[in-house]
Image: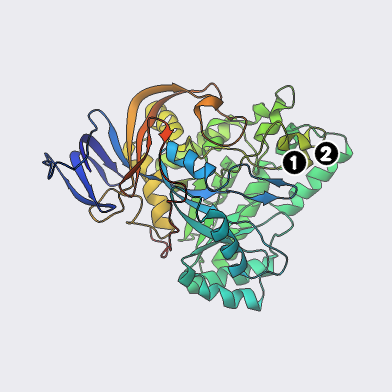
Amino acid sequence: MLITNGIIVNAGGTQKADLRIDDELIVEIDTALAVQNPSEQVIDAQGMLVLPGGVDPHTHMDLQMGAHRATDDFFTGTVAAACGGTTTIIDHIGFGPAGCSLQHQIDAYHGLAGGKAVIDYGFHCAIARVDDAILKEMSQLPDLGVTSLKFYMTYANRLSDEETVNLLARSRELGILCCVHCEDHAMLTELRKRFVAEGKTEPLYHALSRPAECEAQAVSTVLNQARAAGDAPVYIVHLSSAAGLAATQDLPFIPNVILETCPQYLLLDDSLYAQANNEGLKYIMSPPLRKRADAVALWQGLADGRIDTIGTDHCPFYFATDKQAGKDDFTQCPNGMPGVELRLSLIHSEGVVKRGLGLERFVELCCAAPAQRFGLYPKKGVLAVGSDADVVIFDPDKEVTITHDLLHERVDYTPYEGMRITGYPRTTISRGEIIVQDGRFNATKGRGRFLKRGFSRR
């Protein structure tokens, strides 16, 4: 395949050049490349941006959450991702049975993803307890190609302070990157109890029970713990608030802290919880949507380099059924919303077009940095000779009004309904194969491959 006349955008620079693909890899990038043989497919990308395939470092496909299961499995979810220009996901696997090994859930998720995923994928391991057996088993994770793990500071499977310090110290020793969900459990638990006791159970009280101070306190705690564990590497998932961002600046320098935010915290706000007819249930996620001022602070953090990556935390549930479990009590509503399909277009439109975020920075946040931080670079996240031929031909001028019917996520709403955006993917190429053309998916179910990842790099 030969892609001609496009503007190639990498995190390190932009150039007008042609790009040749052979045997799933990028084999040549130069100006005025000639067709080599009659069978070579030529794509004219005149007026288009040629981007590395998006790398989404934060998804929850097929996740069981109490009585509810995320509506996108590894087939429908990766089809949606591909239609939006994402060619790699790293999924946060769910917790297994009490007392199970790390290997148990990794094997379970291979069963969920294998034969279904249409793009390449990796896993973050989930940690529900820390004991001698887990600390020992962690040494096997790199051989399994899983070089990151996730733990929670709230929910039933949260870790204690002692467990957290032991885990961070062990992860530093092994070179494994710890991802952490930062919400102060004691604070949010007390607020939830208080609101429910007072009969304040509408969706807005979900947000009020998990204020920005809840996130900031947890961020401060875990970064101090990481410092005590020898500057252990920490990746803060879905940073949502100005207070949370400020907390990362107020501590002694920690060289290995990495920050992620998501489009919903950049583009939506907590006024949506007050919508009539229980519409606010659509936006129940943790952490919750914040104030407009928080979004301003996060955009500034993206512009000045304090925030490193943009993921989606894609975890959809049907509004008509699953989300209605919270209609009388927000604490019963499953947490999560869709987003895997729109990440590139939303950030291009709202960041590049409206706020002057540079194209290279856009690619860094959505492609290169996630690949680097999670051991996939330069196989993924860059258009370079020898890299996987994951390419998105992106029309920077195409104007689209977002509607649920436009999208491929298996859910009955989009939180971005009616939003007018500029810039949309035209063609998605995964390992040299066109899998999406003009919003139409046309590839084989299960063609995606599990990625055995290396170690984080900056």
Which quadrant, please, contains the N terminus?
A: top left
Name which quarter of the figure residue 133 lies in: bottom right
Is 245 above or below relative to 418?
below
Name which quarter of the figure residue 418 lies in: top right
For label 2, the residue is 195
Compared across the picture, whether 53 is left or right of 111 comes to: left
Instruction: Identify the residue at horizontal 40%, vertical 21% (top origin).
Output: 399
Q: How many marks?
A: 2
The kind of residue tagged 2 is Phe
Residue 128 seen in the figure: yes
Instruction: Identify the residue at horizontal 35%, vertical 57% (top origin).
Output: 377
Name which quarter of the figure residue 324 lies in: top right
Please state the horizontal and vertical placement of residue 78, each as a whole percent of the image.
49, 44
For label 1, the residue is 209
The kind of residue tagged 1 is Ser
Residue 229 seen in the figure: no
Q: Nearer the viewer, residue 440 or 177?
A: 440
Compared across the picture, whether 1 is left or right of 348 comes to: left
Is 131 above or below relative to 363?
below
Is 403 above or below relative to 337?
above
Q: Nearer the viewer, residue 8 or 66?
A: 66
Please state the horizontal and vertical placement of residue 238, each as a whole percent of the image.
56, 46
Mark 2–mark 1 distance (CA, rounded to whole Å): 8 Å
Instruction: Identify the residue at horizontal 19%, vertical 42% (top origin).
Output: 40
Dot 1 falls on a residue whose secondary structure is loop
Label 2, residues with CA under 10 Å away: few <14, some 14-19, many ≥20: some
Please state the horizontal and vertical placement of residue 280, each as a whole percent of the image.
70, 29
Q: Nearer the viewer, residue 135 or 357?
A: 135
Q: Nearer the viewer, residue 425 or 209?
A: 425
